Amino acid sequence: MMRTPLCDVLGIEVPIICAPFGPWEQVELAAAVCEAGGLGSVGTAVTPLPEARAQWARLRRLTDRPFAVNHTMRPFDPEAFEATLAERPAVISFHIGDPGDLVARAHEAGIRWVQQVFDLDQARRAVELGVDVIVAQGGEAGGNGGQISTMVMVPAVVDIAGDIPVAAAGGIADGRGLAAALALGAQGVVLGTRFLASTEAAVAPGWKQAIVDAAPQDTVKIAFVDAVLPPLSPGGHPATPRVLRTPFVDRWNADPGGAAAESVRLRAEIVDAIAAGRLHEYLPFTGQSAALVHDVLPAREIVERIMAEAGEALEGALRRLPR
């Protein structure tokens, strides 16, 4: 089963975490990943609290295994966080900011804390705060992140983390990526793009097919993020999202100053797109690992395939070494 200490910390069976997808509802996907032995996640970003509570209740009906509720500094919602503490999921995950005393408050409620970081100062701060798991996210990842490559980020964070388990994120979509992460010192992986292209992911079929069809260069960082997404709360870390190219992305990447000048209109357009379930037509968050995704599969099959491939990759690497 390739169980690592990360599994013991999070109460899971395989070292695979499904990334949260912000405003996109992912209850069925989270439950499927949990039932396959990994850690499923649900996001809270711009989700009305009654809807978030309904999602948590539905997730608990679908699985009795540990899951994560994600919070972010774009923006941070104190009411949703208080509700999460009262809900007492096994794990709270957090990114794009310094959580400060939120970690201690979660621990007081018996909740594990997973902190995603994309530079080394953030990793050092996570250690100071006593988080339970650090996610070292490379710049290949989709969604909000930094610029350091996964190959550099992961071992550098492992060196900082000490006894805190590290999970690798960014550019990982198959068992070879899990095997590589383990070789770099990580104890598991976080996958976003691979799980977007799953049967259970509640995103548009066209987005899933675009992932399957994408080449690495089809994903780009967006230079106008602060003009269109909700503003960062105090303590937030500036981050640059990676998305699949769309006409909207190409238009405003070529003119970030113009996007800033039209921020009020563009942000309203994005909010309307979120409400209508059409955000993927504007900003389909996707990582470079799309180039490694060739099909849309059930989440359980994705988990099982990754675990089998990782075992084969590790064994094959040993066989190829000189005797």
Image (cartoon, rainbow, N blue to C red):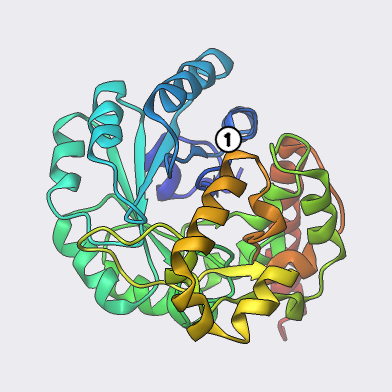
Residue 72: x %, y % from top left: 36, 52
Give the camera-side residue of 58 and 191.
58
Give the camera-side residue of 180 and 113.
113
Residue 275: x %, y % from top left: 57, 39
Residue 69: x %, y % from top left: 40, 37
| Residue 283 quadrant | bottom right
| Residue 212 drawn above or below residue 78 | below
Q: Which quarter of the rendering shows the C terminus? A: bottom right
**Which residue is situated farthest in the top direction here?**
61
Q: Which quarter of the rendering shows the N terminus? A: top right
Query: What residue lies at 50% left-to-right and 24% top-to-bottom?
Result: 55
Query: What residue lies at 31% left-to-right and 69% top-to-bottom?
Result: 237
Give the camera-side residue of 106 and 71.
71
| Residue 126 drawn above or below residue 84 | below
Residue 224: x %, y % from top left: 50, 76
Query: What residue lies at 46% left-to-right and 64% top-to-bottom?
Result: 186
| Residue 311 quadrant | bottom right
Number of numbered discs: 1
| Residue 174 drawn above or below residue 323 | above
Query: What residue lies at 58% left-to-right and 70% top-to-bottom?
Result: 242
Q: Is residue 185 visible?
A: no
As drawn, is 54 to the left or to the right of 131?
right
As drawn, is 65 to the left or to the right of 244?
left
Residue named by callout 1: 25
Element type at mark 1: loop
| Residue 239 drawn above or below residue 49 | below
Dot 1: within a 10 Å radius of its alpha carbon, few (fewer than 14), some, or many (20 or more) residues? many
Q: Is residue 32 visible?
A: yes
Give the camera-side residue of 38 and 93.
93
Q: Amino acid at mark 1?
A: Glu
As drawn, is 313 to the left or to the right of 76?
right
